[in-house]
Amino acid sequence: MELSTVDLIVIGLFFLLMLLIGVWSYFRNTDSEDYFVAGGKLPWWLSGISHHVSGYSGAVFVAYAGLAYTHGFSVYIWWALTIGLTVMVSAKVFPVFWVRLRKRFRIQSPLEFLETRYNLATQQLMAWSGVILKLFDIGAKWAAIAILLNVFTGISLTWGILISGGISLLYITFGGLWAVIITDFAQFIVQIIAGLVMFVVVVQKLGGLESVFTVWDQLPEGNSQAFNDPYTLGFALAFLFINFLSYNGGQWNLATRYISAPTERQASKAAWLSGALYLVWPLILFFPMWAAPVLLPDMEDPTQSYGILTMELLPVGLIGLVIASLFANTMSMTSSDINTISAVISRDILPAVNKKFRKEATSLTTARFTTFLFTLGTIVIALQFERFGGVLGLIISWFGALVGPIAIPMLFGLIPWFKSCGPRAAIGSILVGLLAFVITKNVELNSLALEVSLPVLSSAFTYILVGFLERDTVPDKVKQMLSDIAQE
């Protein structure tokens, strides 16, 4: 089935809107603070929506759609539920810390405080490691949306990556964080409309609203269960810890949503909004994916289920809207990632390489240049994605590798309980976590939960142990810094 002219027009208008927002945002940026943290003026509702949609990508409709087809409801438990709970429970902690860091230490990058908290070497190790790993993470997301494009239009994976990546490259480079935030809001609206349309059509196809409850009896055994091997309780608990770290700032782009809030209260409200959306919206969004085995039985490639449902069930025009929403999800996550990584490169890495990059007069030019080059790098990686284990392998394994070794010293380093943990604890946790990741890639562990959790648990254990052994060696300036951000 080929896309109609109307569908193509809808998709074209969506891309045009993204570019226009980028051009509009271009004129809102006067310096790097505007470009990277929206001048610290981001309203809580925009921040919360952006925090929420930045956690999605086209991978949800490819890799996770495949898991919803084969393993059912468990994907909600270990993914959406764990995110929603961790974000809401910690809404008065880490979002508040991030705002105080911007106000009291003038940070624009989530890693800027690390030079004071630990030392320059630790900051640079974390910055370089995170930037390199994010190249692969974002590359996986370009590859995911290219697979969807291939299903809908027959466009090759190469051209799909170039189209989605190229559009994003333009509007992110133009507009900075304001472009990312406004496009996130536009993409959220598109996602809600498209998701509700798909939900209603599938419910009608299944016989009415009662099918929301009755369809589970028609699905394969285990698909209605909260835990479905290998996505066991242990796996869910591992992801609970990983998501606690990730969505409170371990994913640097999500830390930026809090850093950019004008007040501590608004940062907390943003977290509550994002968490509530994670608890509710995926139940509607994923229902067509859970029902897919009834509508599309015996699929050889379940990762294509959502795309095929869209093409078979929706009328002309609405297909284009759903495809636009799939682009929207990927572009929300990737664009916010790229903006924050560019902040890390501009604010943390380049000034350490050459002092001329510390000049505020050229900060905006540097910001746009690094954004352009990093985005280009992710597109190059995406073109080679099959060499790195495919989309699902990249999303889960590289995500775990990133969060464990890097998020532990960053987030634990903000908590006064761990004030005795210095540079050796931070570097040790990074190295041990990465070593554990290498082990999981080369040793058969016979447990997906252990494979995912080993890097992050190894990092946490090492950080706490070394910090305990080297207690009382932390400089007074670090103790004062932690006291400043822990108190109002």
Image (cartoon, rainbow, N blue to C red):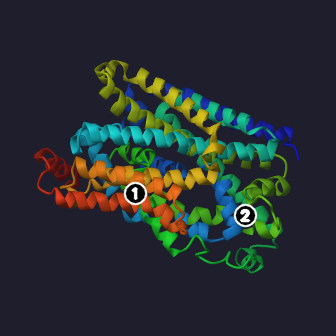
Q: Is residue 354 above or below residue 218?
A: above
Q: Which residue is mark 1?
A: 245
Q: Is residue 225 above or below residue 183?
A: below
Residue at disc 1, secondary structure: helix
- Determine whether, in the image, residue 392 is placed left or right of residue 344: right
Give residue 384's position: percent from left, percent from top.
64, 38
Residue at disc 2, secondary structure: helix
Q: Residue furthest front?
A: 443
Residue 285 falls in which quadrant of the image?
A: bottom right
Point 30% across, 24% down: residue: 358
* Mark 2 residue type: Pro
How many other residues sit within 10 Å of disc 2, few (<14), some (14-19) or many (≥20)?
A: many
Q: Is residue 23 above or below residue 90?
A: above
Q: Is residue 270 visible?
A: no
Q: Which residue is mark 2?
A: 288
Q: Is residue 39 above or below residue 118?
A: above
Give residue 440's position: percent from left, percent from top.
49, 58
Q: In whole angstroms, how far apart are the C-alphas of marks 2 and 1?
A: 30 Å
Point 79% across, 49% down: residue: 319
Q: Residue furthest right?
A: 1
Residue 283 falls in which quadrant of the image?
A: bottom right
